[in-house]
Amino acid sequence: MTLLFKYYHHKREEDILQEDIEQYLIFIKTAHQVGRAKCRSVAQACSFFFKKIHPCEYIVPSNLYPKKQFILPNIMSEEDIEKLICTPMTVKEYCVVGLLYGTGMRISELCNLRIADIDSKSKRIKIIQGKGAKDRYTLLPDHLVDRLREFYILESRPKEYLFTSKQTGRAMHPRSMQLVVNSAMEKAGFKGSKYTAHTLRHSFATHLLNSGTNLHVIKTLLGHSKIETTMIYLHLQKHTQLGIISPLDQLFQGDTKSN
C-alpha cells in the first residue's frame, strides 16, 4: 500500500477513488511488467484495505487479475488495416469496414444503426439499445463522413436504417453484414485469415490503447459493463494522452500533414 500512496502522493487517502486504484493496478502491470500473480496480490491488498482498514462505499475488484488467463482476441496490425482501407472496394464495403474499425461497434449494433443516430456535426454516433440495453456514444471518424453521404445517396436515401436488406427493407442481418466484411477482406488479400467483423472491433480497442487512450474511455466507447472485460487489451503498452481520435482518422493524419 506504501507504493500506492506514493503514486497518489498529491491525494489524501480518503480522496482516492476506485478508478484511481484500478488505474494504479494498470500502471504497475504495464510500466513495471509485473506478473499476473503479483498483480492479483496487490489487487487483493487494495481490496482488503479499502473494505476493512479504511471502510468506504466502494470495493476494489480483486478479480481485475483473475486466475484464468484471458485468450487474447484476434487483432489486425495497423499495416493490415491500412492495406484493407486502401484496397479498391464498393462504397458499401468501405463504409462497413470503416465503421466497424473506426467506431468499435459490434456487428449487431452496426446492423441496427439508424440514420438519425449519426451526428456528423458533433462527429459522434449514438448506439441505441446495444448489448445490455444501454445507450452510448462512440466516435464518428471524420474520414468516413463523405463516404457515408455517398452511400446514403446510392442507397436512395433510406428512411430509417443505414444498412438495409434488399428483400425486406429492414435492418440488414448480421450474417449478411459479415458477408460484406468477408468480401472486403478477400479483395484485400486476407481470404482465409480468420479476420471477422469482431476482429475490427478488437483492433479499434487495441490501437486506441496503443496510442495512449485511457482504458476507462475505451470501456465506455466499447459499451463494456465491466472494466475487467476491457482489460484483455492490456497486452499493449499504455501511455497517457489527452485527446481522443478514432484510429481510422489517425491512419490518415500523415496524409493530411503532407498535403
Image (spheres, grey):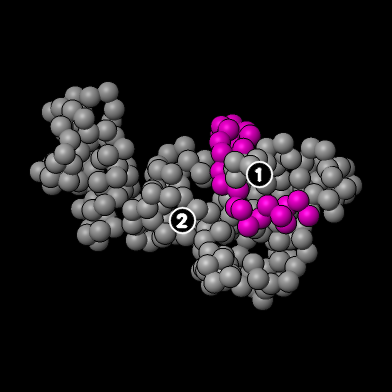
Residue 133 at x, y = what percent? 59, 31
Residue 55 at x, y = what percent? 19, 24
Q: What residue type is labelled 1?
A: Ser
**Residue at coordinates 25% horizontally, 58% vertically from top-left?**
31
User: Relative to 47, does residue 93 appear above or below in the rendering?
Assistant: below
**Residue at coordinates 71% horizontally, 55% vertically from top-left?**
146
Q: What residue type is labelled 2?
A: Leu
Looking at the rendering, in which quadrant would you find the C terminus? bottom right
**What's the magenta region?**
126-150
Can you identify the residue that label 2 sits on?
Answer: 208
* 145 in magenta: yes
Tag 1 near tag 2, CB within 8 Å: no
Q: In the rendered image, which quarter is residue 48 located in? A: top left
Dot 1, crowdedness within 10 Å: few (<14), some or many (≥20)?
Answer: some
Evaluate whether residue 35 shows in this view: no
Q: Please, what secondary structure does the residue beneath circle 2 have?
A: helix
**Residue at coordinates 31% horizontally, 37% vertically from top-left?**
19
Q: Is residue 195 left or right of residue 21?
A: right
Looking at the rendering, in which quadrant would you find the N terminus? top left
User: Relative to 79, does residue 47 appear above or below in the rendering?
Assistant: above
Q: Please, what secondary structure does the residue beneath circle 1 have?
A: loop
Separation of residues labelled 1 and 2 (CA atoms): 21 Å
Q: In the rendered structure, which disc, 1 or 2, sits on the residue that comes first in sequence?
A: 1
User: Which of the labelled discs sits on residue 202, or is there none?
Assistant: none
Can you identify the residue that label 1 sits on?
Answer: 120
Q: In the rendered image, which quarter is residue 176 located in? A: bottom right
User: Relative to 55, does residue 166 appear above or below in the rendering?
Assistant: below
* 205 in magenta: no
Residue toward you, 106 or 152:
152
Residue 87 at x, y = what percent? 69, 72
